[in-house]
Image (cartoon, rainbow, N blue to C red):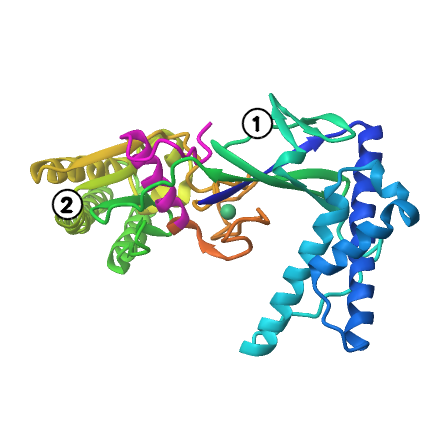
Amino acid sequence: MIEAHKIRLHPTSEQKGYFAKTAGTTRFGWNWALAEWNRQYEAGEKPSALKLKKQFLEIRREHFPWTWEVTKNASDQPFLDLAKAFTAFFEGLGNGKKTGRPKFKSKKKSKASFYLANDQLELGDHRIWIPKLGWVNMAENLRFKGKVTGARITKTADWWFASITVELEDPPPPPPTPAVGIDVGLNRLATLSTGEGFENQRFLKTAQARLRQANKRLHRRKKGSANREKARRQVARLHYQITCLRDDVLHKLTTQLANGYGMVGMEDLNLKGLLKNRSLAHSFSDAALGKLLTLLTSKVEQRGGQVIKVGRFFPSSKSCHYCGWKWEDMELSDRVFLCQNPICASDQFPQDRDHNAALNILYEALRLIGLIDQVDLGTG
Ligand SMILES: [Zn+2]
């Protein structure tokens, strides 16, 4: 399995100059190859990336000596990229999925980027070594363990990044079906890693709204009055009703989970932290949260299973379950998780926030009990 980690670089201004030059050389190679491809195609020949590359190398020393000043990948990767782009284009024509014909890259409009094959880079502690340049500082170390297959250096706004691809040493086993992760949420009572959701019951919401009204009424009544006593009794009755309704929901949910799964991963909830959030306090009291965990643990254990508690600081909502990329400034109101890692298979593919969190909780639980030990999904 191939994973990618996009790391921010901290180049010196001299190193930035090298990056720009390498990206420029890469763009030049692409444009040269595309022009030559078009020319040969129009002349009725059958252009191929390999042939074009050979042609380029033959005239390179004489015509483009400056291409030797940067990594050799700047002069060979564009040919491979162009071949891939043409394959995608022709396949698209065949199966109706339209992929644009490869275009020339302009300095202004195209994204500055270049590729480094695995023999053209080396990783150190918070740094990456690049041929004819040396060590460049990196903001973090590579998250994955395995064989580094290559890296793409790209520029976004004024920042440079390295997307390093890694062939994992030991692919993580697919999650065994009797294991599940649960995310307990604001909008939905629980979301499972299977994608299944348990909504907060409408009748519970209605009862809670009535309780809030009754509470307001109670505070308006004069202390010691008969009306106040009446209001107090109504509040107590509603409290009891809500507890019964909620217990019913919790029992149904935990029984279903315990019957279906031998291993359940769940967040070790930070009750105080959660209750600071008023909207969560509405749908879920601390008692209910504690009860969910207690009921679940006892039912699962009765059946010989196990509940794994995942640390409360584990960033389950903010990490992409697929590649571990972290959305640092994700807000509570962001209901959809969008991975920004360009090499991630779920790049830009909208994932339900709670479903993604439940999957992260499942993987973290599996990692905690040693079923996955090679993949660090961003807990560090
Ligand atoms: Zn991702």
Q: Which residues are magenta?
A: 356-380
Q: Secondary structure at mark 2?
A: helix
Q: Would you say 260 lies left or right of 337 here?
A: left
> In the image shown, does 76 or 103 lie closer to the viewer?
76
Give the residue type that dot 1 points to.
Answer: Asn
Q: Residue furthest top?
A: 125
Give the mark nearer the N terminus: 2 vs 1. Answer: 1
Give the residue type that dot 2 points to.
Answer: Ala
Q: Secondary structure at mark 1?
A: loop
Q: Would you say 169 lies left or right of 252 here?
A: right
The verdict on residue 274 being magenta is no
At x 29%, y 54%, the residue is: 200
At x 61%, y 77%, the residue is: 93
Task: Quadrant for the N terminus, please.
Answer: top left
> In the image shown, does 301 or 114 lie closer to the viewer?
114
Q: Nearer the viewer, mark 2 or mark 1?
A: 1
Q: Which residue is mark 1?
A: 141
Task: State the image quarter where residue 220 is shown.
Answer: top left
The verdict on residue 365 being magenta is yes
Q: Are there few (<14), some (14-19), or many (20+) residues within 10 Å of tag 2?
A: many
- Residue 237 horizontal/vertical position (percent): 17, 47
149 versus 131 height, above or below: below
- Residue 105 horizontal/vertical position (percent): 80, 58
Task: State the image quarter where residue 148 is shown.
Answer: top right
Q: Is residue 270 visible?
A: yes
